[in-house]
Image: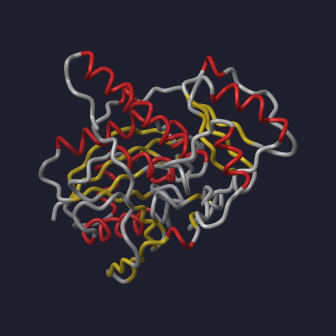
Amino acid sequence: MRLGLLSCGGTITERYRPDGTLDRLGAHDLAGLTGPTAWAVHDVEAVDSSDLTFASVCGAREAMRRDRESGAFVLCCGTDAMEDMAYASALLLDRDRPVVLTGAALPGGSEGSDALSNLRDAALLARAMPSGAGPLVAFAGRAFDPVCMVKIWPQAVQPFGPDIAVRGAMAAGFVTLTGGCGKADSYADLDAADLDARVAIVTETFGPLAGFPDADALDGLVVAGKGAGGIAAGSEADLRRAAARIPVVLSTRCPQGFHVNPAVAKHAFERAHALGLVTAGYEGLNASKACIRLVAELGRVRSDRRKAEFGTMPTL
């Protein structure tokens, strides 16, 4: 099977010069690291992961759509935004062929980089994934579900976790899938222009929220509550006013998002609903991923309105 290699920059593409400056490896250079693997190479962006956007994901999607010969794809990007890029990919990329994201902890152009092993593992995983599966992340011999994974260590050869996000392992040329491949609602019909909603994240710390944003300047808001969605009493008035104007989603500052036991009443959960906050569809999403999903949902509303204006029935 021929594989498509999509490069979006990141540490895996970095090559440092003796004077400390760097240039970036292209998709062709990354493909050359792996030896005789059959790759179709696509340079999407050459940026630090902090500069990745929804347009980056849409650019990768367009490259995939143009490449009808590849049976699966490996997408390379930086690890700092890997969990965001992977979750956005799960929402926005087509499901006709498997996609695996990977990167490197050490610059791809340096001796001893983990780029080679991660690329090889990603290729193995992409070939092993079933048709229709959502994207996975291959890193340091493990396969991760984008919905659950987070970067736990800022700098580590294996920076991701937790164990509940692991969906398989790659070792000695073999792939073992130990759980279902990632699933998420599809927004693959949206264009980059649909994904420009202004969504902010506010985080509860110790005491009520300070510096609350102007809801009239936003299209949506995500609240990273304490623990299982806890909100200070002093934050309620601001949140109620905001929820009367824009969608306000309840999340948590915990990395794994919140989960509610339906058999046990949760005061913080019911209290959030009383304030007008949204929870449906956001269970298990941390604040960053909740923000990505809310932008996609607002984009769907915008897209449906545009289609209705031009005489096309909105998507159901």
Name the colouring of the figure: secondary structure
Q: Nearer the viewer, residue 213 or 159?
A: 213
User: Where's the C terminus, which quadrant?
Assistant: top left
Residue at left 19%, top 62%?
38
Query: For this view, does 58 lie left or right of residue 63?
Result: right
Q: Nearer the viewer, residue 305 or 83?
A: 305
Q: Nearer the viewer, residue 9 or 21?
A: 9
User: Where's the N terminus, which quadrant?
Assistant: bottom left
Query: For this view, does 271 lie left or right of residue 135?
Result: right
Question: Quick one: which residue is furthest to the right in this view?
Answer: 207
Residue at left 41%, top 69%?
117
Q: Quadrant of residue 177?
A: bottom left
Q: Position of residue 237 (x, y in %)?
A: 78, 30
Q: Position of residue 123 (x, y in %)?
A: 30, 66
- What is the tally of numbered marks visible in this picture? 0
Note whether residue 237 is visible: yes
Query: For this view, does 135 lie left or right of residue 11?
Result: left
Question: Quick one: which residue is furthest to the left in this view?
Answer: 69
Q: Quadrant of residue 213?
A: top right
Q: Position of residue 285 (x, y in %)?
A: 55, 53
Q: Quadrant of residue 56?
A: top left
Q: Is residue 125 above or below residue 93?
A: below
Residue at left 60%, top 51%?
286
Q: Position of residue 244 (x, y in %)?
A: 62, 25
Note whether residue 15 is visible: no
Residue at left 37%, top 41%?
57
Q: Nearer the viewer, residue 49 or 245?
A: 245
